[in-house]
């Protein structure tokens, strides 16, 4: 049986001491979330995670979801009641505008809570995350009537939300989609087509499901330039807000899949279902990208969440499992064997997972905070800088955190030996659940391609230059501190590798774009390592500052030690990625397809 303890202490350290979030109390939303309020929210979220959500996790995985003969879908026992608690408690709308029933708090705080909920029960939290994503798209692109009609019920948990992109013949290439929208002359459209891989597409937890569906209006241009977005509720909504007839959308089947069994992955059939345009005709991708970018950040968070709970249980097991003896004198001579935590390689493995988790948590919160500030700013320079940063780092957070998060879950499973392969320990569920994060919301190879082919050269490389300049300033500002000398030296070396890799890709791209693309995954991981190293440098600095004024807690000592481990043993991998990039892509792109 697995356990979970929410990392509230670490989150508070990041928010209070690293990000210094209280400096933003002059901004709307932040002023309503001072330290005592944040502590109360995080503590209550921890209680819900540990006592309500996590006890349902293993059972939900074993029981899974069931498609019934009437095309309805039943979720695992207990999910309905738990989801109702999330809605009634205001958790779904934590950062949504108060005008529609939300609490208007910073999204940074909502992301911290989301990590806890996802660690505790990823399949259940997905329903909340998808609903928040649909709300986000409606807030930006929906009409006021649509906002008033749908959002309050979604934030309350009475209704849920989904995103409908993929079709059987059209995955990443959305321009190939065939779902059609026929205008009816009364402001509505009839939506006809099939969508696949729709998480939470049908379930019996909520009264209604608000589907956001990409479709092509008859006569629209070919490709993505002719795609529009529509809101298509499972049940129609009357003028007074009550529910009317069932719409012509049904669940054709649910997928039998590797993990996240507690969340149904549906095939949805739209048979002239009634829908309404969201935003402008043929501009559906603008609206859907609001959901997709948020979902990519959330997917990175999911991978972190599974790495975190996998680490916690593996560490507990390593401290309890008696097996063999330490090299040298027995660590526990009064016991028949020593716990495996005495072995250096066990410690190396666990320390590597922990070092990733803590830096990944910092990177997600650091990035979300920038978005929060930009949304509340009227300064064009601040907004532009945040857009540049998020454009550059979003594919990295999605791609690198999910690659590393899955690898960490596998490493945690390794701590159990053969027992890690057995269902009862729970380790294999974390591996299975983490695996999807590398695949959906744009597979990681697509993230690398997007980074190198689109985000990197955008505005003549303005975003990567700004990121490198920011780190250079940070290194320069702290160069004179003896206690940070090793930290700044490691970050400087990694930053230099990133600069050289950027220059190499630029040179390759001028000769043959495919040569640059051949190094895209290595570049994504190099940039990710540097970003995580930057987070560790900031955390080490903040921890040392607290230690210097008398806080000698074990937490801070471990923080500095874990940071040193990352800088010494993980961050130098930037040199390997740089060497691969410099090797070029000829031996990749010149091999004929028939040879594979």
Image (cartoon, rainbow, N blue to C red):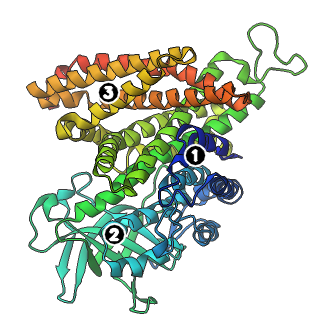
Out of 127 and 383, give the one closest to the viewer: 383
Q: Which mark is residue 429?
A: 1
Q: Which mark is residue 212?
A: 2
Q: Which residue is drawn at 81% across and 16% down?
A: 331
Marks 3,1: beta carbons within 8 A: no
Out of 453 and 173, give the one closest to the viewer: 453
Name the quarter where the C terminus is drawn.
Answer: top left
Query: Left or right of 379: which side holds 158?
Result: right
Q: Is mark 1 on a helix, strand or loop?
A: helix
Query: Left or right of 419: which side holds 226?
Result: left
Q: Position of residue 205 (x, y in %)?
A: 55, 73
- Does residue 324 appear in this view? yes
Residue 54 sits in which quadrant? bottom right
Mark 2 or mark 3, which is nearer the start of the sequence?
A: 2
Mark 2 or mark 1, which is nearer the start of the sequence?
A: 2
Classify mark 2: residues with Cα within 10 Å, few (<14), some (14-19) or many (20+).
many
Q: Which residue is drawn at 19% across and 23% down?
A: 585
Alpha carbon separation for disc pair 1 and 2: 30 Å
Number of numbered discs overlaid on the protein picture: 3
Q: Position of residue 22 (x, y in %)?
A: 56, 48
Q: Position of residue 434 (x, y in %)?
A: 50, 44
Mark 1 or mark 3, which is nearer the start of the sequence?
A: 1
Residue 132 sits in which quadrant? bottom left
Residue wearing tag 3? 522
State whether residue 247 is above or below residue 296. Answer: below
């Amino acid at each position: 049986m697995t356990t979970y303890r929410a990392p509230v202490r670490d989150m508070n350290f990041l928010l209070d001491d690293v990000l210094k979030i209280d400096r933003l109390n002059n901004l709307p939303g932040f002023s309503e979330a001072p330290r005592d309020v944040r502590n109360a929210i995080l503590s209550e979220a921890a209680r819900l995670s540990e006592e309500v959500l996590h006890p349902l996790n293993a059972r939900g995985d074993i029981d899974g979801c069931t498609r019934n003969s009437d095309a309805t879908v039943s979720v695992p026992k207990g999910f309905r009641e738990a989801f109702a608690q999330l809605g009634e408690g205001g958790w779904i709308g934590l950062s949504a505008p108060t005008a529609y029933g939300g609490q208007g708090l910073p999204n940074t705080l909502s992301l911290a809570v989301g990590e806890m909920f996802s660690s505790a029960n990823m399949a259940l939290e997905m329903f909340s995350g998808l609903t928040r994503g649909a709300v986000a798209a409606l807030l930006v692109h929906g009409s006021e009537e649509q906002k008033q009609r749908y959002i309050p019920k979604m934030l309350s948990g009475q209704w849920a939300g989904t995103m409908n992109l993929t079709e059987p013949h059209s995955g990443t290439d959305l321009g190939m989609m065939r779902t059609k929208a026929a205008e009816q002359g009364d402001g509505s459209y009839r939506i006809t087509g099939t969508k696949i891989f729709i998480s939470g597409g049908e379930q019996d937890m909520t009264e209604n499901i608000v589907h956001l569906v990409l479709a092509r209006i008859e006569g629209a241009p070919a490709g993505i330039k002719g795609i529009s977005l529509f809101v298509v509720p499972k049940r129609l909504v009357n003028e007074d807000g009550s529910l009317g007839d069932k719409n012509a959308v049904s669940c054709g089947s649910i997928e039998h899949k590797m993990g996240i069994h507690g969340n149904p992955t549906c095939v949805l059939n739209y048979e002239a279902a009634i829908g309404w345009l969201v935003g402008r005709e043929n501009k559906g991708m603008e609206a859907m990208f609001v959901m997709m970018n948020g979902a990519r950040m959330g997917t990175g968070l999911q991978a972190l969440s599974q790495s975190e709970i996998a680490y916690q249980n593996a560490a507990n097991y390593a401290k309890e499992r008696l097996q063999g003896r330490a090299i040298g004198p027995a660590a526990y001579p009064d016991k028949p064997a020593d716990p495996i935590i005495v072995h250096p390689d066990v410690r190396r493995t666990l320390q590597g997972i922990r070092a990733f988790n803590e830096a990944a948590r910092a990177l997600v919160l650091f990035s979300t905070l920038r978005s929060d500030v930009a949304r509340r700013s009227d300064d064009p320079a601040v907004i532009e800088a945040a857009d540049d940063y998020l454009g550059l780092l979003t594919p990295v957070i999605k791609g690198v955190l999910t690659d590393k998060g899955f690898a960490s879950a596998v490493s945690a499973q390794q701590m159990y030996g053969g027992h890690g392969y057995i269902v009862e320990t729970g380790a294999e569920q974390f591996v299975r659940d983490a695996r999807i994060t590398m695949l959906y919301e744009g597979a990681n190879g697509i993230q690398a391609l997007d980074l190198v082919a689109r985000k990197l050269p955008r505005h003549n490389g303005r975003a990567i230059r700004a990121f490198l300049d920011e780190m250079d300033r940070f290194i320069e500002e702290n160069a004179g501190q003896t206690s940070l000398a090793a930290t700044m030296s490691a970050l400087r070396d990694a930053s230099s590798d990133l600069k050289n890799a950027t220059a190499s890709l630029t040179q390759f791209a001028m000769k043959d774009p495919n040569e640059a693309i051949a190094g895209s995954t290595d570049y994504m991981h190099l940039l990710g390592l540097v970003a995580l190293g930057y987070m560790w440098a900031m955390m080490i600095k903040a921890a040392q500052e607290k230690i210097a004024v008398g806080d000698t807690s074990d937490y801070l000592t471990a923080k500095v030690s874990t940071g040193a481990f990352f800088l010494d043993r993980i961050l130098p991998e930037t040199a390997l990625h740089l060497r691969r990039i410099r090797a070029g892509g000829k031996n990749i792109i010149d091999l004929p397809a028939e040879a594979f």
